Image (cartoon, grey):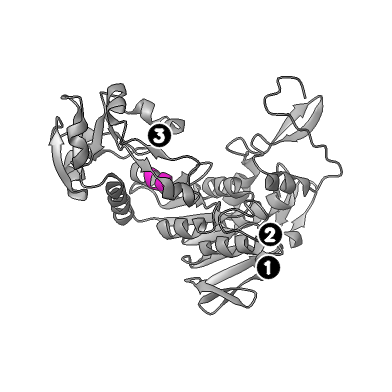
Amino acid sequence: MNYEVNKYSVEELKKVLNVKELINVSENEEFDFLRILSMKHYGIEDRSNNILFFPVVLDQKMLDDGWIDVTTDLKTPINEIIGKFKEYTFVIEPDMKDRIEYADAKLIVVDDIMGSIDKLYDYQLQRNDFKVVAATGSAGKTTTIGLVEKVLKNKYNVLRIYSDRITPILLKAHVINLLNKNHDIVTLEMGIFFKDHVKVLSDLMKPDVAAMINIGNAHLGEGGLNSIEDICKNKAYILRNPKIGFINKDNKYLANINLKGDTLFYNDEPLFKTNLENLEALYPSKVEKDNEGIIINNKKIKIPILTELSITQYLIVYKIAKHYGIEESDIVKTLNDFTPIENRLQRVNLFGKNVIFDGDSSFKERIHQLSLHLYDKCYLVIRKYGDTSEY
């Protein structure tokens, strides 16, 4: 899919950033892409002629906080990077200037590289008027947000922010390059790997509408998540900023989340003050269903893979779509036409059998959710990594 990528002129950058100096850069130059993180999976770099490269440093603190798996320092080897990408323009800090070995290197000198990224992020947030829909849960976030995007596109221009792991720097890179005045709604999932992750993400991109799908034991024991209750309470930060929330009350942990006045509680424990005006409790188990899907308002919605999770996802998406005024006929048609995204669940023919295939069963919670299917029989087929033999 091609995305409309924001262009930035030098004049605009000078207004937003504290630019100290331009070296071999024209005042009327314009950049097609601000390369903060690689976005090759969008095809952006391949389609860009003039790239402004930010040599970021992802430091030990980000590693300790669970945002990244390995640290990255692009400032130290800056000459190697310039040598490899001589056609790019590079953002550098004053103390880097004397180390540059290429006299013809195109450079924009700023006070602070990471601080400049923050300024550009805030700049795009402030100049664009949009709503945010976010979802969290231990499994099913990607498909839920994919469904939300498809349904809301019946009426709105939607930007979906996606990655296997959405981090602050990745969120900023997407907003800086892709968010524009034409977008009405931004959709994204908010995952938790360490306890503060959802809190940080929901403050960076404040949801107007948020949903909690389920709570399981994914990431239990990591980063201050010492119990499933810890996971639930920390994921609940997605409900701090929005006015509207949807929550799966069939889940035994989410059943303990309650709104009392302006405070969100876990049982009798107050968690935080919230902007919520309505927290709608959803009970997927009570939805009318048959062997093909669910029935809402006498409308049949077929679900490709019928599990407790998929029913929850479709119900949440239906509720969000109704909140945003999508016509019921459009909701039903879009949900019936939806196919899984990002290599997620699909039906395939294997050994003459019609089976469910999950192209990315990356952790046990997803396998667990698959086991909660509503079919008479289930066969689990596993292929060993690195094994080139047949199943």
Please say if 151 is above or below 284.
Answer: above
Residue 223 image position (x, y, % from top left): 55, 55
Query: Does residue 125 lie above or below 344 as drawn?
Result: below
Mark 2 vs mark 3, foreground winner is 3
Identify residue type, mark 2. Asn
Instruction: Name the residue: 31% across, 40% down.
Output: 6
Give the spatial CA distance, label 1 vs label 2.
Answer: 25 Å
Secondary structure under badge 3? loop
**Mainly helix, strand or loop, the magenta region?**
helix
Q: Which residue is mark 3?
A: 38
Q: Residue at x 61, y 60 (%)?
A: 231
Q: What residue range appears in magenta?
A: 169-173
Looking at this view, is 274 or 154 the one in front? 274
Does the magenta run of residues contain 126?
A: no
For marks 2 and 3, the one nearer the N-term is 3
Residue named by callout 2: 297
Name the image quarter holding residue 375.
top right
Q: Nearer the viewer, residue 19 or 64?
A: 64
Residue 327, quarter of the rendered image: bottom right
Q: Is residue 77 visible?
A: yes
Query: Position of 28 compared to 185: left or right?
Result: left
Residue wearing tag 1: 255
Q: Residues within 10 Å of mark 3 (few under 14, many from 20)?
A: some
Name the kind of residue labelled 1 in the image. Ala
